[in-house]
Amino acid sequence: LIDFSANINPLGPPAGVWQAIREALPAIVAYPDPKARQLKNALAEKLKLEVEQIAVGNGAAEILYAVLRALRPQTVGLIQPSFTEYREAADLLEARIIAVQTEDRHDFRPDLSELLAVCEQADLFIAGYPNNPDGQLLPIDWLVQMAEVLRRHGGYLLVDEAFIDFVPMAKSMLDQLDQYPNVTLLRSMTKYYAIPGLRLGYALADRTLIQRFERELPPWSVNGLAQAAGRAALTDERFEQRTREWLRAERPFLLEGLGRLAGIKVYRGEANFILFRCGCPDLQTRLGRAGILIRSCANYPGLSEQFYRIAVRSREENQRLLEQMARLMGRVQQPCPTY
Ligand SMILES: Cc1ncc(COP(=O)(O)O)c(C=O)c1O
């Protein structure tokens, strides 16, 4: 199967990562550095932060759960639809969830006044930047306003930047972490560097918060191979450039190709994945028979079985997907912007 369902960089892992893993293999007989000092140093240098502002974990998902355990929010605000693990993690704590429901007719763009109203009530608001599955990127000044509102009553903002490396126009509150000690940025290295099986993620926040998160993370949570791979990945600028070039060409190619198919509405997010709606409820099964796996979004609260998400992949693979979809759905002469 060609996997369009997981949003993994098809150019990776970088050659330096393979090399680092090979070199680190003999060290698996010893425990890894429980503090992952070299990896944290490399991150601190790259992001121009203090090491104490960084927590690393076995993927962003592990840190997400640790953040919630550390903050123990009674009320969690989130955008719906969004990454389903936010809800799962909040449910584990039996927190009350208040969702800002975004709508198909507004391309899943949330409303600022609704976001702020939920921030007034929430102990923690979790926002994807960009949001999974629609790729929406909130304006950075909205995130700042949300952080302000939350701070006034002792609330926290968690910005999930798992896909931020794929979005050149994204801003991030990275430079404002000192001003906003209630803000945490969550990042994943598994998608961009294509190591979801190895797992690596990190959180950036105020020193005191980082200490609280680390108390909730198990010891040795980042294994030795992942620490070595992470260090090598961070220094590979050529890989970053190749990724930018690939995405600059392939995202528009896929968007335009999808837009030319009959009966499809495409949502123009900003990420390395694309959400679309189509009236063919068994599209996933039908494409599966042609060797292509796409993500049905039926299990996202707020979406239905008409919604699908695909990752941007290589030209050959994208072409194959478009051909198979055209075969199943028929072509139209003009792009079809509305459903
Ligand atoms: C929005 C979002 N955040 C976090 C994660 C978790 O990332 P990781 O693989 O680093 O645990 C995912 C994984 O799919 C995701 O989609």
Image: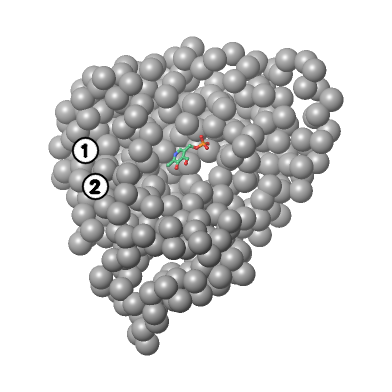
Task: Report the quarter where the N terminus lies.
Answer: bottom right
Q: Are marks 2 and 1 in contact (CB under 8 Å)?
A: yes
Tell me the amino acid under the disc marked 1.
Ala
* Other-residue count near label 1 (Cα within 10 Å), few / some / many at <14 / 14–19 / ≥20: many
Q: Between tags 2 and 1, which lies in front?
A: 2
Of the numbered discs 2 and 1, the one sitting upstream in the chain is 1
Vertically, is 299 above or below 333? Answer: above
* Residue at position x 35%, y 54% in the image: 134
Image position of 49 (left or right of 169)? right
Disc 2 is placed on an element classified as loop
The residue under the point 47% across, 31% down is: 61
Image: 4 above or below 316: above
- Counting labels gives 2
Q: Amino acid at mark 2?
A: Gly
**Nearest the eye: 248 or 91:** 91
Residue 114 picture location, percent across and down: 16, 43
According to the picture, the residue beneath numbered tag 2 turns out to be 302
**Horizontal relation, residue 248 to residue 24: left or right:** left
Instruction: Name the residue carrying label 1.
Output: 99
Q: Secondary structure at mark 1?
A: strand
Q: Position of residue 162 (x, y in %)?
A: 48, 41
Tell me, yes or no, if residue 105 can be seen here: yes
Q: CA distance from mark 2 to mark 1?
A: 10 Å
Pinpoint residue 143: horizontal percent, then vertical percent: 31, 41
Left or right of residue 113: residue 216? right
Give me the residue at 43% from left, 58% from top. 285
